[in-house]
Amino acid sequence: MRDSLILRTTTRVIMPLLLLFSFFELLRGHNEPGGGFVGGLLAAGGLCLYMLAHGVDDARRVLRVDPRVLIGVGLLLALAAGLVPVFQGAPFLTGVWAENKVPGIGKVSTVLLFDVGVYLVVAGTTLLMVLSLAARDEEEDDPC
Amino acid sequence: MNQLVVMPVLIPLACAALSVLASRSARAQGIIGVVGTGALLAASILLLRTVLEHGVLALQIAGWPAPYGITLVADTLSAIMVVLGGITGFAVAIYALVDIDADRREAGFYPMLHVLLMGVCFSFVTGDAFNLYVCFEIMLIASFVLLALGGERMQMEGALKYVTLNLVSSAIFLSALGVLYGLTGTLNLAHLHQLMPGVAAEHPDLVAATAGLFLVSFGIKAGLFPLYFWLPSSYHTPPVAVSAIFAGLLTKVGVYALIRMFTLVFGDLEGAHRLLLILATLTMIAGVLGAVSQYHIRRILSFHIISQIGYMVVGLGLMVSPDPDVRRLGLLAAVFYIAHHIIVKANLFLIGGIVRRLRGTEELRDMGGLYRQMPWLAALFLVPALSLAGIPPLSGFWAKLSLFRAGLQAGQWVVVGAAIAAGVMTLMSMIKIWNEAFWKAPPETDATAAITIEPLDRGRLAVLLVPAVGLAVLTLLIGLFPGFLFDLAGRAAGELLDPTPYLEAVGAVATGGAP
Amino acid sequence: MLIFMAILIGVLYSTGVYLMLRRNVVKLIFGLFLLGHAANLLIFTVGGLVRARPPLAAVGADAPPPDVADPLPQALVLTAIVIGFALTSFFAVLAKRVFLATGTDDTDALKSTES
């Protein structure tokens, strides 16, 4: 299956689309269906597709960073989003919005920051699971 | 000030994130582990001091008022438990510097240790029943990974049993939550306390069934009498540092949940307390009988956990008595017992681990002669061992004494008799470990042939000894100056029996309001 | 409808328990999975089975209109499903590792921690 030309060619088109769509879902999630969780799953799905087409090593190379780094950074972002209101005297995790709008995104808020953290954690966790399971299967020489 | 309540959750979370980022450097992970758990301990002590000064603290997360949002509450009991979590975490993080091998570090021991501590501390401070479920799951998934890390055959078998029984418990917990929500329309513990009398009058049988579900679920987690079999078949399989933190904290989270639920929510359900008292008595006896027949250090200690859980739950079960003095004394004894037990039991596992390193086995029959080699280690072992058995003037003596007094005042002769018998048998098996491991001459056969663990040099032994000595000193201090802990436990018991400060802190929980 | 749901939940619980009592590790996983779903469905059912509108307030309004569905049980179930997903996938990996380490999937043969 790793040598399928069709899969490789379609992956070249579909993976960027999936990643783009995952960002779209992330940003739209505030008021409409979507959000960091779905976005993270979509992003991980895109990379899993790449992994199926090109193998685990190439997928790791495309990802550039260790999935564990994604998890760590995501957790810290979510934590930071929770701590911002604490410094303003509001309870932990209260949503805080910036005054000015950023074009294309709207008002930046700690809620968005939290969602970005969720996005990274979900993508990182899923990739960590799938990549290590797939690596083990490749070692065993009989992919199941 | 109220923001302090969330610190015991945030510090381990931040440490987990940082040590995931540092996953390539075992050294950095070790430093984060020790500093982070140290910070957790400091924050928890600060929290306890603040609670003692200002009364119960509550934090409405994101500012959503109770019962709509998630409330974090720290009363005296929660604060004591968080401090104990911090102490155990700190001790184990130091011990793990030497005890955990490179493979397990790379596979993520430290992040999971922090996640486990986060789950444990979160369950102590949460004021919401569903949130408690989520905390349990955080704690469980971390404990699953810690238990299975390394992948040795014994570990895998132990993990399978542990995971299965705990997932069953979670499923029961979830069902209980569903029914409870259907009955009351809320899952905020303070709100539940207010609604429960009305609901119980309307549907007494449904409330009893729900309480039964909670009892079974928390009973599995705590290791109560007919539900404890997962514990002795899994706790001796992972590395010692993991065993120690499991032994110190995990079952006690179950006991904490039992105490919280069966005082705050089901405080007036006499039948439940009677059942708890019976089960607790059977737990004391069954656990200690299991220990008598064992010759494997950590298996003996695991069975003793079960037996000691019995003592704690007896304190809660004494709420059958209508006399407020007895109720207060029983809960006081339970809280005191938990505090004493966490410190002592974690320490016994740590010292058992040192013995294992020195002898290369945990089988008592193959050991011996340690007293001649290291008399101070033998003395160090005796402090927690005799404390566990309840010898004055160590901490266990005061814990048992207050429990016996409560039991005698309640007129529960059978329970007190069983507790005394279990205490004597505890002493017996502690003497057994002492005799076999330290006192008797080593066996003729060369047991050292089976050593698979790398030998200890002096520096590494010293690192292993630091937490053990620290915990032993703590045991001695509690034993010599029990007044401080008695005051704390008394205050916690008072707040459990009259939760008005708790309700006021959660605040704004008006009457009714079920959707 | 309520009767139907009650029967369904009962069937799920009993099937789950039955599967868990078999001696096979894979059936054990299925059993636990079914238990979790029975609990989810139970929460969903006791939360009130009603035909009602989604609990959304119109722009500018303070509260949603009357006769909306209670969103909390669904949030609880959603959380529980995600947690259950994580636990089940962990258990599946664990079962594979158990099989690789012990060479058996018969729970009766996994007794070496008991002696």
Image: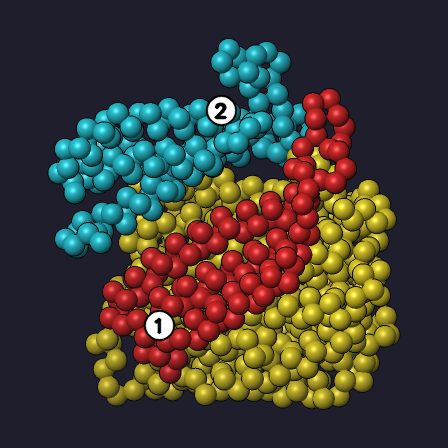
Chain colours: A cyan, B yellow, C red
> Does residue B440 appear left or right of residue B445 in this picture?
right
Circle 1 chain? C
Q: What is the three-letter code of the residue carrying label 2? A: Leu
- What subunit carries mark 2? A
Q: Which labelled disc corresponds to residue A27?
A: 2
* Secondary element type, mark 1: loop
In the rendered structure, the answer to whether residue B25 lies left or right of residue B14 reads left
User: Residue B372, percent across and down?
Assistant: 37, 79
Q: What element carries label 2?
A: helix
Q: In terms of depth relative to the viewer, which is nearer, B231 or C100?
A: C100
Residue B454 in sight from this viewpoint: yes
Do callouts 2 and 1 mark residues in contact (Cβ within 8 Å)? no
Image x and y of residue A82, in percent: 58, 33
At x 33%, y 43%, the residue is A128
Does the rendering let one see residue B349? no
Q: Name the residue under label 1.
A: C24
Q: Do labels 2 and 1 share a chain?
A: no
* Spatial CA span between label 2 and label 1: 45 Å
In the picture, the disc for residue B86 is none
Instruction: Give the residue displayed 82% in from the left and 80% down from the top.
Output: B409
Q: Is residue B316 left or right of residue C6?
A: right
Quadrant of the image containing the N terminus of chain B? top right
